[in-house]
Amino acid sequence: MEKEVFQQEMRRKTQEIDALLTTCLPKEEGYQKTVLQAMNYSVLAGGKRLRPMLMLEVYRMFGGQGGLVEPFMAAIEMIHTYSLVHDDLPAMDDDEYRRGRKTTHVVYGEAFAILAGDGLLNYAFETALRAFELPQAGEEGAWRRVARALSVLAQKAGVYGMIGGQTADIEAEGGKDLTKQRLLFIHEKKTAALIQASMMVGALLAGADEQEVAQIEKCAYNIGIAFQIQDDILDVVGTKEELGKPIGSDEKNHKQTYVTLNGLERSRQEVARLSEEAVAILDGLSERKGAEDAAFLRQLVLQLIDRRS
């Protein structure tokens, strides 16, 4: 897919996801109005909406049709957003800006930022559960697929997924006793887990079998690890525009990364290996499922990892 065509499609799909999110967010009313405002402020702060986009594209690759995936698309973005709200808190990264806007705790105060994050996590599952109410849920096997998707979403977002990765990351601050094995655990759980959830849920809702879902999980693992290694590389050789944050921060903060443990060239080789393997899995699945056009998904994965082209 040509770069210009891909970028146009990316913008169009992002706008469609933004519109979906707007319809799913809670009304700002009642005695809990302030926390609802903080929740909506956080979600509508912008972003590329990569996780719901991945979910939708995988859903379509496996032949999924209809709106059964839409509540989950909104839910995964809410979960991702809640993690960012909590990451920005003074007790965590203490960031004042994200995507060019003041962070939630700066605008609403620390207490309401905590509540907004909690609210988004809970509201994500309220939203995903709406899939059971859709007419499509009455089709044969649909309830089972939705239930399985909910289970995956909960696990990948919880203590055996993203929260577990964040825990290990906090304990590894300062770089003491940080082995390659522990670093890969952090990357897998903190970053890859929600990418896995996005892609696995899309496959499950479309009716993929367990072997295919396992392949998607492996593909998403590669994407997440490659993304984080590339993040470490760009912190050394990239620009602020590419990374979305000041470069050189890892060295300044004496943070051990994949690059400091393995070197720049070996890190680049690992990104290439993981990327090629992820794309090969996607190509094999799309060919087997007879997907009419998985070119956008393929390019989306490469763009997500590389962030240069």
Image (cartoon, rainbow, N blue to C red):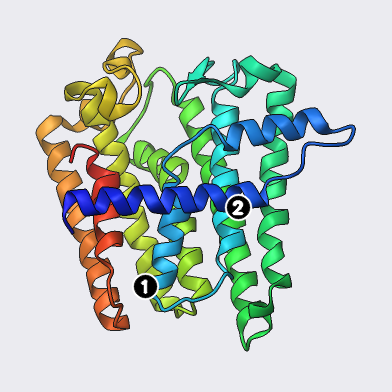
Single out the residue that lies furthest toward the right: 31
SS label for mark 2 = helix
Splitting the image into 4 quarters, where does residue 41 fall?
Answer: top right
**Residue 75 - label:** 2
In the rendered view, would you say 49 is above or below 283?
above
- Seen in the image, is 128 located left or right of residue 254? right
Percent x, y of residue 201: 51, 64
Q: Residue at 27% of width from left, 18% of height from top?
A: 247
Give the quarter of the figure containing the C terminus: top left
Task: Identify the amino acid type marked 1.
Answer: Met
Percent x, y of residue 53: 43, 55
| C-alpha gap between disc 1 and disc 2 | 20 Å
Q: Is residue 194 visible?
A: no
Splitting the image into 4 quarters, where does residue 235 fall?
Answer: top left
SS label for mark 1 = helix
- Seen in the image, is 115 located left or right of residue 78? right
Give the quarter of the figure containing the N terminus: bottom left
Q: Nearer the viewer, residue 83 or 166?
A: 83
Instruction: List the residue tagged with mark 1.
Output: 61
